[in-house]
Image (cartoon, helix red, strand yellow):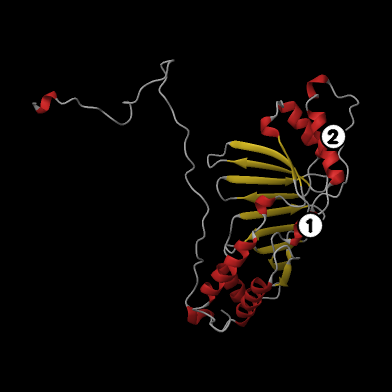
Amino acid sequence: MNIRDIPVRVIGPGSQPTGSDGEAITYMDMPSDMSTFVAPVMPEPEDVMLMDGAREAMDWLRSALDYYEAGGEPVLADLSALDEESRDVVNQILGEGEVSIVCDGQVRARTQESVLAGVWRTFFFDQDDRVVCDLLEVAETPKVIGFAAGSSGAVDTAADGVGAELANALPILVELQSQHDNYTQGGPPHSINLTLLPLSEPELEFIDQRLGRGPIDMLSRAYGKCEVISTEAADIWWVRYYNSMGVLILNTLEVVDVPNVVKAAPEDLADSAERLKEILEPYWPEVA
């Protein structure tokens, strides 16, 4: 056979078949990135060896991670009195992890999970946006969530004046109130998947209006993005998942003390204890 007689199959853009309507077949884009652990950038060991404030803070953190029990109360240390050099080193060691939390209520605070899962840094602000307290915490979730989340125990389920165009929204509010009444702290969560329900935009807006907005907004950046927003009713949260292209793929309401998506798992906390020892070994062997 002559080489010219061998059939050639072209591949690449423009070579693929079209659909039945004549349009080119397209495929969903795959997620392009995922948050992964990156070791912090640290200064030279001789530059930090004599920084007593940073060494004491890391000694406390190592001990807190070693002895923390899953599900226990947050263990806290006040870093407000650290000198600037020690604070810079602590900042470099902790870095920024996957979860960020904003509290804008009677308590004003910003919390950032470190690169060590279950290790949190919370800054409290006064009305002039000045930092008044700098807390380091070891916990599944930081303490600020507990005392700053919604305080109301009731969901407005009144049907008076609600038109037929909002008929699908009222049963959801009734279900939330029923689950809220029966929920106990630490108990199993109850979730309503709004993505699967035939809800119009006005109905979603109506639910949002009835639940109100609480002071806590959380963002988890792991695989894609997840927003967790408190409502005025304690233990009721909006949880919205987005893919890596920013498209909403799951919209839920959860009755729970804190949604699991922002909690550090016990195995992650154990892993953080080992990672911290590896980070500290070149600088303070007696701490690691």
Q: Is residue 284 left or right of residue 198?
A: left
Image quadrant holding the N terminus, namely top left
- Residue 59: name its quadrant: bottom right
How far across and how far down the image is residue 62, in percent? Answer: 62, 75
For label 2, the SS is helix
> Which residue is drawn at the image coordinates 87% and 33% (left, top)?
157
Q: Callout 2, which amino acid? A: Val
> Which residue is drawn at the image coordinates 42% and 16% (left, top)?
20
Q: Pointer 2: what residue?
A: 174
Q: Callout 1, which amino acid? A: Gly
Q: Nearer the viewer, residue 17 or 90?
A: 17
Q: Nearer the viewer, mark 1 or mark 2?
A: 2
For label 1, the SS is helix
> Which residue is drawn at the image coordinates 48% and 48% (left, top)?
33
Q: Nearer the viewer, residue 223 or 196?
A: 196
- Residue 197: name its quadrant: top right
Q: Earlier in the sequence, mark 1 or mark 2?
A: 1
